[in-house]
Image (tube, rainbow, N blue to C red):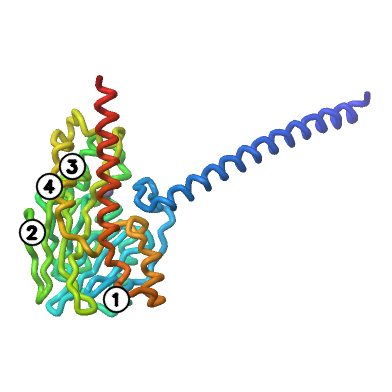
Amino acid sequence: MKPGKELSVHLQAHRSSTMALILTVFVMLMLLSLDALAQLNMDRINPNNPDNRQDNVNVQQQPFRMIDNIWWVGHSEVGSLLIISEEGHFLIDSTAEHDVHWVVENIISAGFRLEDIKYILNTHTHHEHMSGIPKLQKLLPHATIVASKESAEVMGTGGKTDFRYMMDGNRDHLFEPFQVDRIIGHQEQLTLGDVTLMAHITPGHTEGTTTWTLDVEEGGKTYNAVMFGGISASGVDRAPLLNNPFYPNIKEDYEFSLKYLANLECDVFLTYRAPTINLHEKLARLEQGDYQVNPFVDPEGCELYLDFYEKRFRTQLQEEGAAAQ
Ligand SMILES: [Zn+2]
């Protein structure tokens, strides 16, 4: 055989084994993507699934009035609520530092003035909900930042004293530290004009998690609106409920909060994640006028949400208890 021929045979053999490899990888990728697709659909079926975190596919969301004086100014996945009054406005949650410009744009495009925001509040100290606050602080130096004592502490350290960070050391969860102007306690109120918000400290998801409530009116009826601060148990790898050296009272705190929230009157179901409250579906119904009662009036949603997380909490507790024996 001539050297040239030998090379060509060798190359041909090489080519067919490369083809086989490409084919194998292709089939594997197909199977993987089918699996991923199935998983994604599963997640979508269950909007309460906290693992359904689509932070990476956030897109800007047109601001809109949810009910009465409550506006969604967050993005497609994570909430930021603007609550307006004639004497100024409240803003609950900023979204993440890299998304807060959307919140600012939304407030302006909805026709409100930044300088009318008097209070910046939050649900809990996970970065995707409040790491935009330092940027807002620079834009709105006159606004008062209000937080629970425990949340204020975590904000002051940029997340370094959050128990989950102390446990896993994941620096992705850190943020620019900032100081809070005013500490708010359990069942304390904030009033602007004729709008009053009440803070309920509902610890567990974080030590300072805060649920906010207010009365809203529509169609001549008064409804209790509840902005849940977060009640999901994060799993044994992120937040063990038993023998947790970084949060010794975690189990008791969850027990308290789950019971407390179940006793709270809830008509308007609000949280900081769009999928959890079926935001896009409710918005579509709102836009089409396809309702008799505003779709955000959803007492059943409040109940299902609490039931779902109560079950998760009990399951995690049981698994941890069994593993310890
Ligand atoms: Zn969280």
In the image, 27 versus 99, the foreground residue is: 27
Quadrant of residue 73 in the image?
Answer: bottom left
* Disc with the residue nearer the chain's start (1 vs 2): 1
**Which type of secondary structure does the marked residue at label 4 adopt?**
helix
- Name the disc covering residue 254, or none: 3
Quadrant of residue 24 in the image?
Answer: top right
**Which type of secondary structure does the marked residue at label 2 adopt?**
strand
The residue labelled by disc 2 is 182
Residue 115: horizontal and vertical position, in percent? Answer: 19, 75
Tell me the mark number nearer the camera, choosing from 3 and 2: 3
Judge left or right: residue 16 versus residue 53: right
Distance of label 3 from label 2 (alpha carbons): 25 Å
Question: What amino acid type should be assigned to the residue bearing mark 4?
Answer: Glu
Residue at 27% over, 48% down = 307
Residue at 39% over, 65% down = 280
* Disc with the residue nearer the chain's start (1 vs 4): 1
Label 4 packing within 10 angstroms: few (<14), some (14-19), many (20+): many
The residue labelled by disc 4 is 150
Quadrant of residue 169 in the image?
Answer: top left
Decide: is 264 above or below 19: below
* Disc with the residue nearer the chain's start (3 vs 2): 2
Question: What amino acid type should be assigned to the residue bearing mark 3?
Answer: Tyr
